[in-house]
Amino acid sequence: MTRQYVVGELSVLLGQLGAAASDEVSARSAEALRREAETRPFCALPAVTARAIALADEMCWISLLHGNVVAFDHQAADSALLYEFGLCSGLLGDEP
């Protein structure tokens, strides 16, 4: 994978996570991570990816607490995609 591909794919995944947000704070956090992924040096992407997975986890818990099963379903799927991409692209080790 080229660096441009990794940055672009991470940006897309973060955009999807932001779209799945059930509150404005989470949406803004996902957008901020997306900007970081697009503008920071490549060496910063592992940390951005780990923070994105943590945000997705937090979003899932909030949705569960509010009984929003539809939002949880989308957020859990986006979290899985982020984690899988992080592993396959070498941005994450075995544990986020």
Image: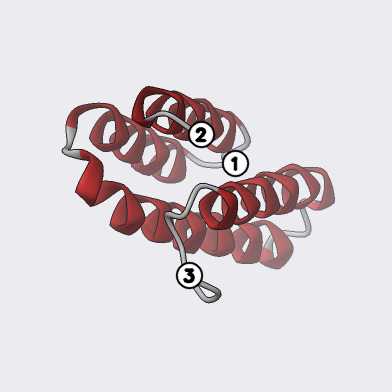
Taking the view exactly as shown, the residue that stands out farthest to the front is: 1
Q: Residue at x 64, y 53 (%)?
A: 84
> Height in image: 39 above or below 36?
above
Residue bearing mark 1: 22
Residue bearing mark 2: 18
**Nearest the eye: 34 or 23:** 34
Please say if the residues under marks 2 and 1 sit with CB atoms less than 8 Å apart.
no
Say which label, 2 or 3, has the lower sequence index.
Answer: 2
Residue type, numbered disc 3: Gly
Q: As drawn, is 22 to the left or to the right of 37?
A: right
CA gap, disc 2 and disc 1: 9 Å
SS for callout 1: loop
Residue bearing mark 3: 93
Q: As drawn, is 16 to the left or to the right of 46?
A: right
Please say if the residues under marks 3 and 1 sit with CB atoms less than 8 Å apart.
no
Taking the view exactly as shown, the residue that stands out farthest to the bottom is: 95
How packed is label 2: few (under 14 Cα within 10 Å), some, or many (20 or more)?
many
